[in-house]
Amino acid sequence: MKKYSELEIKEKVKIALSMLLKNDAFLLEHDVNERSISHKLAEYLQQLFPDYDVDCEYNRKSLEVKKLVGIAECRNSPTDNVSPDIIVHHRNSADNVLVIEVKTPKSESAEQQDKKKLELFTKDDKASSDYHYSLGVFIKFSKNGIDLIEWYKDGQKN
């Protein structure tokens, strides 16, 4: 089972984003739903991480519902349940490589909540999260491409 360095992970994300912009610009130009864009990006990531599972909206930690303690108050929700846009991991294990949150012009309203999720998912703190994703990335798309990429590591914007 291959382990990836931070540099390798970032390079693979960069390649996947390039593939998305080259092959699927239509999705951005026509302001399709965030889930459609996330799905295409996940397909490219799966090619680049063949020895891992790449899942969209995956809401499980082993067999339990995925939760982030404290996220409910951030998003005015009754639960701490979460489903990240895209994750690179081994299902039913603690081997969590990358968590991605995507925003499009249609979905900008929850930007701060997504950034908080990335902080918690990458934090090494059992009180709020014990997912220990190596890296997190926030990607904000526009109709013309990518407006913003922010990396998260150890619970902080990197």
Image (cartoon, helix red, strand yellow):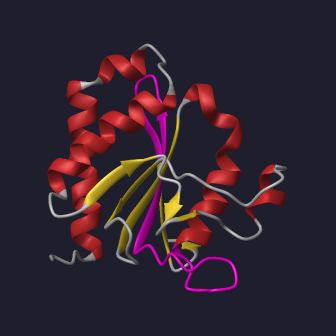
Using the image, determine if residue 14 lies above or below residue 35: below
Q: Give the residue displayed 78% in from the left and 57% down from the top.
A: 79
Nearest the viewer among 10 and 134 is: 134
Q: Taking 5 as reference, is 113 left or right?
A: right
| Residue numbers of the magenta segment | 122-148
Using the image, determine if residue 83 lies above or below residue 62: above
Image coordinates of residue 127 in percent, x first then y, are 70, 85
Q: Give the residue displayed 28% in from the left and 31% down from the top.
A: 21
Image coordinates of residue 141 in percent, x first then y, are 47, 35
Check the image and name the residue furthest to the front. 63
Q: Taking 1 as reference, is 130 left or right?
A: right
Residue 142 is inside the magenta segment: yes
Q: Give the residue displayed 50% in from the left and 24% down from the top.
A: 33
Q: Give the residue displayed 21% in from the left and 26% down from the top.
A: 23
Image coordinates of residue 43 in percent, x first then y, are 25, 41
Q: Taking 48 as reference, is 116 left or right?
A: right
Image coordinates of residue 5 in percent, x first then y, are 24, 77
Nearest the viewer among 144 and 43 is: 43
Using the image, determine if residue 95 lies above or below residue 83: below
Instruction: Tell me the quarter of the picture where residue 97 sits.
Output: bottom left
Using the image, determine if residue 93 lies above or below residue 100: below
Instruction: Tell me the quarter of the picture where residue 144 sits.
Output: top left
